[in-house]
Image: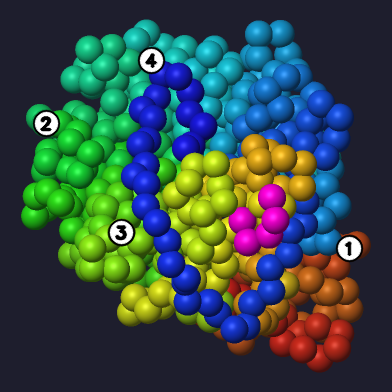
Amino acid sequence: MLKVSSSKVAFVLCAFCLVAAISSPAQTFTTLYSFCSQPNCTDGAEPVAPLIQGTDGKLYGTTIEYGANGSNGTVFKITTGGGLTTLYSFCSKTNCTDGAEPVGLVLATNGDFYGTTDVGGADYGTAFKISSNGALTTLYSFCTQTDCADGAYPVAGLVQATNGNFYGTTFYGGASATCNNGSYGCGTAFRISASGALTTLYSFCSQSGCTDGGFPEGAGLIQATNGDLYGTTPYGGSYPNCALGASIGCGTIFKITLDGTLTTLYGFCSGGYPCVDGAEPGAPGYGAGLVQGADGNFYGTTGFGGSCNYGTVFKVTPTGNLTTLHSFGTLADCEYGADGAYPNPGLILATDGNFYGTTSAGGTSTSCVVGQGCGTAFEITPAGALTTLYGFCSQTNCTDGYHPVAGLAQATNGSLYGTTDEGGANGLFYGTVFTLSVGLEPFVKTNPTSGAVGTKVTILGNNLKGSTSVTFNGTAATFTVNSTGTAITTTVPSGATTGHVQVTTASGTTLTSNVKFRVP
């Protein structure tokens, strides 16, 4: 079960048995860190959000439990070798005005991290900025307007758009009075500046019957190559008869412009119960609701529905045509789920062109407390061929962790990194950080991923000291390398066109960016 605030909807999972999953022959799993390794769990517990690589080459993340100030969560950084440093413990201020239960980070173009807390602040969550050395600034406290018109409970991370502002969603709040007995609304989409000025862009359930979706939770927004934002809601839509019987629909996929014009692209359970096309996209975990593939289409997961009601992986075109790529549950009678069950939001497009993700249940082990399988890490091709890479709780006493509720991240060394909400060397309920190597090669990553000539760009990578050239689709750029050899600072050169960024290292190796850099 996900940990959610008492004011939120709890997810109910179905029990099932398991058989052996297909394994990938070329993968190495390593547990890097087990939480609650420090007295009184001052290092935190239950990491629920994807990890983010910083300019120093380290990975950054959050926990929603424990820390130095009770059970309120932390921000941490960890080396790829497993050395963890707690940067900040929430509820450091009286009445938790600095927030509590952080739910993810994004690396901004200024090198700092921005994120949200589920609760705290004015009791309904915050947006914050934190530096790589742990200096935290609270930017905004939600529900400071009458009837929470500015939103409440931002239970998803932020995304920084090309205009420099950050965008996100809240689970409650907004102008619509059709939810929650006429109070607190059905959620919002918002914009917040780097200095903390917030604008509510859209209030969900503004349309009759919540056909525009409602209660966005867990799954954050992404910015597509056309400049618009895309996301999912687990509830609402045109079809009320979803697998869990929700009267307000089974979830939506939507597009929203930077100024707040929303278009619903797809409503799940379009064929009625049993929702073979999926239900509740973006549930039950944490990560981006969608990822854009190299083909321009969007890929994501539903937490429920599909042929066995264990969730799906889907592809949807920019115009809303949906294809179900995989339904979790391996046998025709749906008794088993060895390929995983209840996939988390946060699929990533890796450098091999395939997508990688996690499921919160299923797999080959039934040793977990929940008795439904302990979760998996998987790979899926754009055509829908799925391979189970790892089944959690494969080690005695689940020292490798179990029940991941966050998506994966690919670091520039090529390896995959992630977290489990529970398990580890210190007990069943604290969680871990792990790495999964599947043989992918090192690469570089640009921040931002688009910009006009003259735009400042940071290039993340490894072993960049002494690099001899940086090119934007073949056009050379001037650059400087930081002292740790983990980041390059450059600007988009005159004459640059859309294409991959390449860095030639001191050893003569050419590293290529994971996505094409877009030059308007």
In this figure, which colouring scheme has been used for the structure?
A: rainbow
Task: Specify whether residue 490 is in view.
Answer: no
Q: Which residue is mark 1?
A: 484
How far apart are the alpha carbons under marks 4 and 1? 45 Å
- The type of residue carrying mark 1 is Thr
Q: Position of residue 234 (x, y in %)?
A: 30, 41
Specify which label sits upstream in the sequence, 4 or 2: 4
Write the residue at 28% across / 12% down: 183
The amino acid on which the numbered mark 4 sits, given as a three-letter code, is Cys
Nearer-the-camera pick, 473 or 282? 282
Q: Which residues are magenta?
A: 393-397
Q: Residue 463: image x %, image y %?
A: 84, 74
**Above/below status of 485 relative to 177:** below
Between residue 62 and residue 28, name the one nearer to us: 28
**Residue behind mark 3:** 335
What is the C-alpha distance between the residues marked 2 and 1? 54 Å
User: What is the three-letter code of the residue carrying label 2?
Assistant: Gly
Mark nearest the camera among 1 and 3 is: 3
Residues marked 2 and 1 touching at CB (< 8 Å): no
Residue to which mark 4 is pinned: 148
Q: Which residue is mark 2?
A: 209
Q: CA distance from mark 4 to mark 2?
A: 21 Å
Q: Residues within 10 Å of mark 3 (few under 14, many from 20)?
A: some
